[in-house]
Image (cartoon, grey):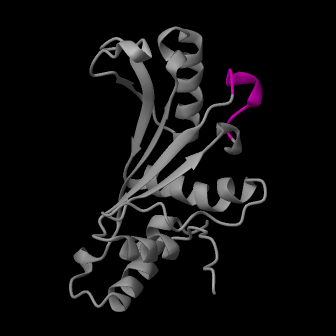
């Protein structure tokens, strides 16, 4: 049986990061807190079949039922009423989170056409990393005939790191394939 990413983090990565970052307590070492996967479409309010198909493939990708996100206010310019479904999201924690990250780094990202690595610059100031996909068919579980249409999705990896540099070291240790650093 292969070693899971969570076990590898606890046994190998966490002690290494603790020494590298010179942290006294093992509990202060940065870790992944959650992974949020979301998608949206303006057609969810009119096309209920698209909404159902999107829920199905999002549940298949993540292993968890998605939550509908609804508009908070009406915006006439966008023909949007308060309370209409505008998106779907799934928040992964615990073992599912580590399993999803392992699948993302080892199966999904290498399947991308002309893949050179993920961007090093999409960290926010709190050390969270966001990754966007223009189409959901890069995931092996998604069957092209059953999805309705091509749709994008966004994956946000939330960490306990306080800054982007620490978060970068954590994700690099967990196997995230970042682009090579450009030397000038």
Q: What secondary structure predominates along the stretch shown in magenta?
A: loop
Give the residue drawn at x 34%, y 11%: 81
Q: Is residue 89 above or below residue 41?
A: below
Work out which quarter of the rendered image holds the C terminus and state it.
Answer: bottom right
In the rendered image, residue 92 lying in the magenta stretch gets the answer no
In the rendered image, residue 47, in percent from the top left (x then y), is placed at 56, 10
In the rendered image, residue 68, in percent from the top left (x then y), is placed at 39, 24
In the rendered image, residue 36, in percent from the top left (x then y), is placed at 42, 45
Q: Which of these two is toward me, 52 or 10?
A: 52
Q: Is residue 66 visible?
A: no
Q: Which of these two is toward me, 176 or 100?
A: 176
Q: Which residues are magenta?
A: 141-149
In the rendered image, residue 146 lying in the magenta stretch gets the answer yes
Q: Is residue 64 visible?
A: yes
Q: Is residue 1 above or below residue 26?
A: above
Left or right of residue 126: residue 130:
right
Give the residue drawn at x 21%, y 83%: 25
Give the residue drawn at x 40%, y 16%: 77
Q: Which of these two is toward me, 184 or 144?
A: 184
Q: Which of these two is toward me, 43 or 68?
A: 43
């Amino acid at each position: 049986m292969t070693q899971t990413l969570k076990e590898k983090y606890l046994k190998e990565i966490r002690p290494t990061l603790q020494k590298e970052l010179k942290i006294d307590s093992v509990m202060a070492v940065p870790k992944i807190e959650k992974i949020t996967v979301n998608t949206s479409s303006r057609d969810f309010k009119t096309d209920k079949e698209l909404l159902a198909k999107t829920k199905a493939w999002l549940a298949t990708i993540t292993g968890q039922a998605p939550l509908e996100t609804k508009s908070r206010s009406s915006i006439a310019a966008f023909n949007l009423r308060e309370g209409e479904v505008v998106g779907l999201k799934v928040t992964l924690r615990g073992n599912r989170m580590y399993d999803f990250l392992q699948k993302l780094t080892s199966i999904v990202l290498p399947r991308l056409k002309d893949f050179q690595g993920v961007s090093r610059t999409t960290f926010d100031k709190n050390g969270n990393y966001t990754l966007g996909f223009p189409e959901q068919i890069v995931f092996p579980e998604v069957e092209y005939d059953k999805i309705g249409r091509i749709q994008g999705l966004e994956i946000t990896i939330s960490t306990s790191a306080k800054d982007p540099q620490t978060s970068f070291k954590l994700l690099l240790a967990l196997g995230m394939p970042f682009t090579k650093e450009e030397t000038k």
